[in-house]
Image (tube, rainbow, N blue to C red):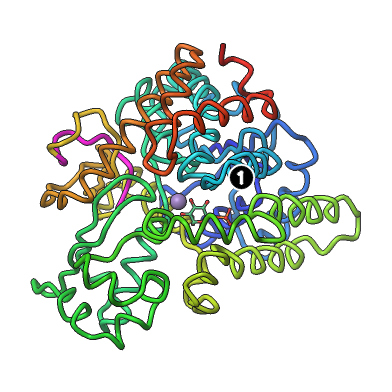
Amino acid sequence: MKLTILGGGGFRVPLVYGALLTDRAEGRVTEVVLHDLDDSRLYAVAKVLEEQAARVPDAPKVTATTDLDEALRGADFVFSAIRVGGLEGRAHDERVALAEGVLGQETVGAGGIAYGLRTVPVAVDIARRVARLAPDAWVINFTNPAGLVTEAMSRHLGDRVIGICDSPVGLGRRIARVLGADPKEAWIDYVGLNHLGWVRGLRVAGRDELPRLLADPDLLGSFEEGKLFGVDWLRSLGAIPNEYLHYYYFNREAVRAYQQAEKTRGAFLADQQARFYEEMKRPDAAALTTWDRTRAEREATYMAENRETAGAGERDADDLSGGYEKVALALMRAIARDERTTLILNVRNQGTLSVLDTDAVIEVPCLVDANGAHPVAVAPLPEHATGLVCAVKGVEREVLAAAESGSRTTAVKAFALHPLVDSVNVARRLVEGYTDVHPGLAYLK
Ligand code: G6P
Ligand code: MN
């Protein structure tokens, strides 16, 4: 089986390859094609993969190319993990927004809109090429903002594109753990959009254990979301929000913390990763060790500003292992080998949330088998959550419309309608600011 990874020179590709190396079963991936626009990044990552594969018998063969069409031909699965504009672009997304006093984050608020506006045209081009060159391939989208980008691609690929994120899985795992339950045996009642969802229940042996957690302040305050949101707020909500909702519920504090930080997340990662790729150019570089050290530092500092404003302290050691590569592998196995399983994925709504139309991509538990991912019916969201979900989906639709038409006016509308952008004038200046710094937004007229 052939797996093509777009953004194949990306830093997190070794996580995916490491997961593939653990798969010994019949029908596993035997061939990995890395595609990237940048040769030197491909070279660096290939070096890490080579060290990972040493001593593993029958490790999947790795090739690399900068030719997109060549990479796509004959692929059974395509992982799309691109970063349009690179981490420098991410840093610009943050800076322009923060200068206007609004959130600059790669997936939430103004920063997410800017990143979406840059990424959607590229993702659509990829989707069109996949439809032409590898019509039977399944596309697993990792690219952020994942829900929006998946929806853009689904307009060309239908249900053959599925978006993934590790944050709902991580959240479910943490809740199960504090309740003393086995995450594999728990049913996690989670729904929303990507980075905008809530756990409303967690069933073990047919019983909802979430009320037990909400009733116990010590348990509730003992894990990441409890520390981030605070026990009282979680009890008021009666649900556990995805960590990204911290940017909504504590927006003022998050914006201030990001403004005061020495470096934004994007700027920090841009420097950190530049050092890694530079190091990989040395012939004697210890590729795997250097990569792993860099990865550990990246994970330890994830959402550091949010945790600091909440006084949440360091991340739990158990939360440092990431996990989105595991979601991707489980999804690929379920489809390729009809290994039926349940995963929280970004798929078309198809009536799951009655307030959204059938084509809206949502994040929801899905049954997965050889026929793809099938969203499971869920209880409706409470009004406050429905309001946010509908507002943000409305914004995503404006982003998609702007990307399709190239209309600057529509781009302004997207920013202005976001709940975290507080004035139409701010939206206008954001479009000015972003088009000034991003060549990838030159299409907006
Ligand atoms: C989480 C999110 C991802 C994000 C990742 C890395 O896993 O769900 O969408 O890409 O964190 O964030 P970072 O700030 O390290 O790039
Ligand atoms: Mn994510």
Dividing the picture into quadrants, the one containing residue 437 is top right
Taking depth in this image into account, of 320 and 432 the one nearest to the observer is 432
**Magenta segment includes 265:** no
- 142 relative to 217, above or below: above
Furthest toward the right, the residue is 283
Above or below, 109 against 133 in this view is below
Visible in this render: residue 2? no
Which residue is depicted at the point 31% across and 25% down? 158
Where in the figure is residue 353, as x and y percent of width and height?
16, 41
Which stretch appears magenta?
344-353
- The quadrant in which residue 72 appears is top right
Task: Determine whether 340 is above or below 92 in the image.
Answer: below
- Picture residue at 47% right of the left edge, 16% below the top: 409
Quadrant including the C terminus: top right
Q: Is residue 410 above or below residue 212?
A: above
User: What percent of the width, then of the height, locates residue 390?
Assistant: 25, 37
Q: Nearer the viewer, residue 33 or 273?
A: 273
276 displayed left or right of 201: right
Left or right of residue 441: residue 330: left
| Closer to us: 192 or 66 | 192
Q: What percent of the width, then of the height, locates residue 431?
A: 56, 26
* Residue ID at (56%, 31%): 430
As helix, strand or loop, the secondary structure at mark 1 comes to: helix
Q: Is residue 168 left or right of residue 301?
A: left
Mark 1, other Cα within 10 Å: few <14 / some 14–19 / many ≥20:
many
Q: Amino acid at mark 1?
A: Glu
- Looking at the image, can residue 251 be seen? yes
Q: Farthest residue to the bottom: give it.
A: 218
Q: Position of residue 336 (x, y in %)?
A: 35, 43
Q: In this figure, which residue is indicated by the disc labeled 1?
A: 94
Q: Is residue 408 left or right of residue 34?
A: left
